[in-house]
Image (tube, rainbow, N blue to C red):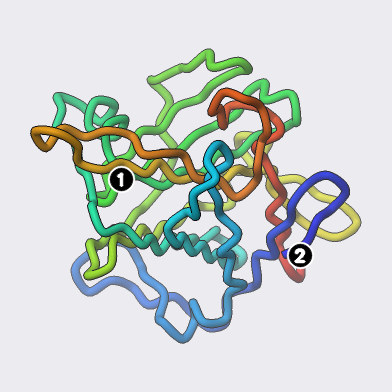
Amino acid sequence: MSDAGAKKTYLVKRLNGKVEASETGGMETLSLQQWAGAEVLTDFAFPWSELPAPATIFRALWDDENFYFRFVVEDADVVMAEGADAKEMVVGSDRVEIFFTPGDDLDPYYALEMDPRGVVLSYEARFHRRMDWSWCCPSLRLCPALTDSGYDVEGVIPLATFRELACLHQSERGLFLKAGLFRAEFSHGEGDAAVVKDWISWVDPGGEVPDFHVPEAFGVLEFEGS
């Protein structure tokens, strides 16, 4: 990980080996050995709190067809809200998030908010917070899991999806995405009601009011060997 000008940068390494097809017909998952070849990103913090943030680990890999990502989350109190639809369920739950955008003006940008069950709230938006809730990420596949220490969310997005959305850019260094990586951390309060504890981010967007929907919250994912 490094800083590219004012932007934090994460190196997405090329996947070593082939992806094994799922025997159950679900998402293809990577082996632990393959994930061991990815850069480990642990640089997550509470931008609006002096408290230390619980551990969040992000890894990503890529091949000619897909972008693979995995969040490993430490959480002693996993909150999963009920609701009539994905929006109601996800907005009140612990979750990890990936935003990506064609340009720094966030006009538009795309958001994936994924809870520990694999329920996804996806939307297209335009600065500032003008959401189109009808948008769904094409061909997103997830494999969530509750663990003894929290939860994992592993996923796959075809590179074709990023290209169709004009989000996959080319520079002299290779392919890259302008992306934000976030986590919403909830806990159970009085009467078992869910209350937001704080917001966790890879990039500190600054500002006095918690807000990830700003250009300052985005970094760069660079694709090694592209």
Look at the image and tell me in which quarter the C terminus lies.
Answer: bottom right
Q: Position of residue 3 (x, y in %)?
A: 80, 56
Residue in the picture at 67% in, 40% down: 218
Residue in the picture at 37% in, 44% down: 185
Answer left or right for 226 relative to 64. right
> In this view, which residue lies farthest toward the front?
50
The answer for how far apart the CA atoms under marks 1 and 2 are is: 31 Å
The residue under label 1 is: 115
Answer left or right for 1 relative to 36. right
Q: Earlier in the sequence, mark 1 or mark 2?
A: 1
> In this view, which residue lies farthest toward the left?
191
For disc 2, the neighbor class at 10 Å (few under 14, some 14 to 19, many from 20) is some
Which quadrant of the view contains residue 90? top left
Element on which disc 2 rests: loop
Amino acid, disc 1: Asp
Look at the image and tell me in which quarter the N terminus lies.
Answer: bottom right
Taking depth in this image into account, of 97 and 216 the one nearest to the observer is 216
Relative to 33, say whether 182 is above or below. Answer: above
The residue under label 2 is: 226
Relative to 32, say whether 198 is above or below. Answer: above
Which quadrant of the view contains residue 63? bottom right
Residue in the picture at 44% in, 45% down: 183
